[in-house]
Amino acid sequence: MSESQLIAGLHSVRTALKHGAGSVLEVWIEGVRKQDRRVREVIVLARESDVKVSYINRDQMDQLTSGSNHQGVAARTQVPSSLDESALETLLSTLEVPPFLLILDGVTDPHNLGACLRSADAAGIHAVIAPKDRSVGLTPTACKVASGAAESVPFIQVTNLVRTLKWLQSDRGVWLVGTAGEAETSVYEADLKGPVGIVMGGEEKGMRRLTRES
């Protein structure tokens, strides 16, 4: 069985139930909040997916979630698994709109990966792509920071990032836009219409040389 994690908060638990219900193992609800409309939605989603719902008091919820801002809701889920190149090909083949991709070249901090996933979810990114080597994966910390986005945004780890970039350009017609501190054009001024992949480098050195050249 894959590693499990505790998630807390209405948005995180609702997203997990909507997009990855098969990975949700159990849901806890603070009993006095079970009539709240948003909490009721979580309860209905859990029951529709045959997920066990337990009712506990505030002290128990605080203890369970280590005092986080749980909003009366928590769940234990399996940590999502990353996908591979074949999943990326399938995803791009089934999209009915131009692909919008985020490509991370060497992000090693799980907090940063979680923040990238959360931002990608808000921006409508179809998939986040990263290399398998010298990059962080979907750790429990990354998933917690992602606040449910790890379940809704496909995270794809590839063996050779440069090869994947060239394949996206030649076979899929994706325009790649690299981000760097010395760039003369702001990302807010760039033309990002059509099939686009935004490439971001690692925390310390940014994009690697071969990535920049691609």
Image: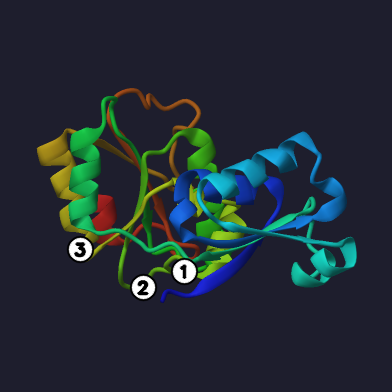
Q: Residue at x 57, y 69 (%)?
A: 5
| Three-letter amino acid code of the residue under disc 2 | Arg
* Rendering coords of residue 162 (x, y %): 20, 57
- Relative side of 133 to 121, left or right: left
- Relative side of 88 to 136, left or right: left
Q: CA distance from mark 3 to mark 1?
A: 17 Å
Q: Looking at the image, is 68 positioned above or below residue 122?
A: below
Q: Secondary structure at mark 1?
A: loop
* Rendering coords of residue 195 (x, y %): 27, 30
Q: In terms of sequence position, does the residue under pointer 2 or pointer 3 come before the other?
A: 2
Asked whether residue 15 is in view, the answer is: no
Q: Which quadrant would residue 107 be assigned to in this image?
A: bottom left
Q: Which residue is labeled 2 in the image?
A: 134
Q: CA distance from mark 2 to mark 1?
A: 7 Å
Q: Residue at x 38, y 24 (%)?
A: 191
Q: Which residue is labeled 3 in the image?
A: 160
Q: Are the residues tagged 2 and 1 within 8 Å (C-beta)?
A: yes
Q: Looking at the image, is 3 positioned above or below residue 170?
A: below
Q: Residues within 10 Å of mark 3 (few under 14, many from 20)?
A: few
Q: In terms of sequence position, does the residue under pointer 3 or pointer 1 come before the other?
A: 1
* Rendering coords of residue 41 (x, y %): 66, 38
Q: Are the residues tagged 2 and 3 within 8 Å (C-beta)?
A: no
Q: Residue at x 47, y 45 (%)?
A: 19
| Three-letter amino acid code of the residue under disc 1 | Thr
